[in-house]
Image (spheres, grey):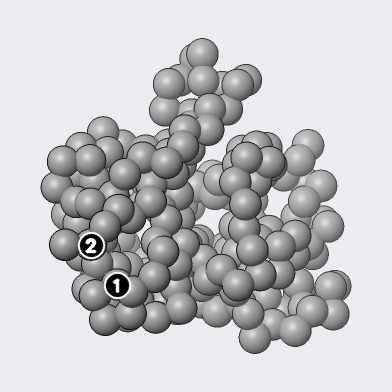
Amino acid sequence: MKEHYYDKLLNINTRGDRLEGTVKKPRRYYPYEPTPYSALEILFENYEVNRSDSIVDFGCGKGRLNFYIHYFFHAAVTGIEMNETLYQEALENSKMYGRKTKSRLEGIQFHCCLAEEYQIASSDNRFYFFNPFSIQVFRSIINNILVSVEEAEREIELILYYPSQDYIYFLENETSFELKKEIILPHDYLRDSNERFLLYRLGKVI
């Protein structure tokens, strides 16, 4: 089981089934469900992350993606989580990860706030979404990203796992983001066509 193998390797605990946590989430936010490690393996076999990148994971839960990227690619990672219970578990995972890897943890941050309230840093250039909330919240975040780019121009990419049609329509019809690549999960796609990653790159800012 990859879930057990990678959690043990990273000395973290990110397993769980659609955890609601102790705080009731607004309807526009969806329950906790981490990206499978098997999907992360395929993603990063087909997508390059550099040390200079700064990745933001919206709806990070217990921090699985954050620790995976930091361990294998040494890039800066920021997790945004509105659920206090999950946020505290991410912080605990950070302590355990640091003890196991002896890594400097300055490159790993977690913030407990609504996703649309996170202040996009000028260094943030990669943004990850596992369909964590409604299209209304997604729109607000994309608008925040675009404002940030106006203030500090840079290359921006979005990584969407299990993308909703609302997200896709919005990006392709109401923004300058362009589809860069589709990564299909071969063992799951035949039974569920949403088992894929879509990578979007910000086109020319008008």
Is residue 166 at all visible to an observer of this figure? no
Q: State which quadrant residue 53 falls in.
A: bottom right
Measured Cα–Cα span from mark 1 to mark 2: 8 Å
Q: Quadrant of the N terminus?
A: top right
Q: Nearer the viewer, residue 180 or 89?
A: 180
- The residue under the point 46% across, 78% down is 123
The residue under label 2 is which amino acid type?
A: Val
Left or right, residue 129 beside residue 88: left
Q: Are marks 1 and 2 in contact (CB under 8 Å)?
A: yes
Image side of residue 4 versus residue 33, left or right: right
User: In which quadrant will I find the C terminus?
Assistant: bottom left
State the residue position of label 2: 205
Which numbered tag is attached to residue 97? none
Is residue 198 rendered to the left or right of residue 176? right
Residue pictured at 53% horizontal, 33% vertical: 183
Q: Residues within 10 Å of mark 1 (few under 14, many from 20)?
A: many
Residue under the point 64% across and 63% down: 50
Compared to 27, does 100 lie above or below? below
Q: Is residue 29 above or below residue 86?
A: above
Mark 2 surroundings within 10 Å by alpha-carbon count, few (fewer than 14), some (14 through 19), many (20 or more): few
What kind of element bears circle 2?
loop
Q: Position of residue 36 (x, y in %)?
A: 61, 41
Which is more toward the observer, 160 or 14? Answer: 160
Secondary structure type for disc 1: helix
Residue underneath mark 1: 149
Quadrant of the rendered structure where residue 83 is?
bottom left
**Residue 193 occupies quadrant:** top left
- Position of residue 182 measured from the top left corner of the image (x, y, whole percent): 47, 33
Q: Residue at x 62, y 40 (%)?
A: 46
